[in-house]
Image (cartoon, rainbow, N blue to C red):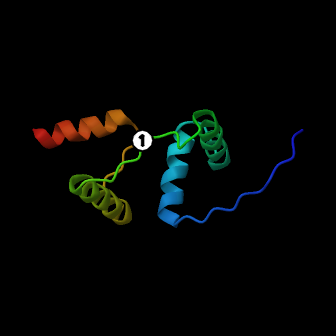
Amino acid sequence: MAATKMLHVRVDDDLSEDANAVFRSLGLTMSEAIRLFLHRSVVSQGIPLELKVPNATTLEALAEARQMRRAKKVRFSTPEELFANLNEAKD
């Protein structure tokens, strides 16, 4: 087995929780996701994603999403629940 190194990364609680939720939905742990990112960085010889500065609309949406999460407003277990709720709001 290859030798390994321990990495310690500091992130705020919200980011950690949000990222863990995404990774769990993909069947990954945080460690597996970070290893995947590192492997893809080596293969692509760069950061394996497109980096952009968020525009004002995106920043506003992110702030709204954080506020909703803190207030524990509407949450959905499945995409179908989300779409059903959106369709109800239209009627």
Asked which secondary structure carries label 1, the reply is loop
Is residue 29 depicted above or below 15 in this figure?
above
Residue drawn at x 26%, y 54% as measured from the top left: 61
Residue drawn at x 36%, y 50% as measured from the top left: 75
The image quarter containing residue 72 is: bottom left
Q: Residue furthest front?
A: 45
Q: Residue furthest right?
A: 1
Q: Residues within 10 Å of mark 1 (few under 14, many from 20)?
A: few
Q: Position of residue 67 (x, y in %)?
A: 32, 64
Q: Position of residue 70 (x, y in %)?
A: 37, 65
Q: Position of residue 18 (x, y in %)?
A: 48, 54
Residue drawn at x 64%, y 38% as measured from the top left: 42
The image quarter containing residue 46 is: top right
Is residue 12 depicted above or below 20 in this figure?
below
Q: Quadrant of the C terminus?
A: top left
Is residue 38 depicted above or below 65 in this figure?
above
Does residue 15 appear left or right of residue 38 in this picture?
A: left
Residue drawn at x 30%, y 62% as measured from the top left: 63
Number of residue marks: 1
The three-letter code of the residue at mark 1 reads: Glu
Between residues 7 and 13, which one lies in front from this camera angle? 7
Does residue 88 appear left or right of residue 21 in this picture?
A: left
Q: Position of residue 77 (x, y in %)?
A: 41, 42
Does residue 89 appear left or right of residue 9 in this picture?
A: left
| Residue that mark 1 sits on | 50
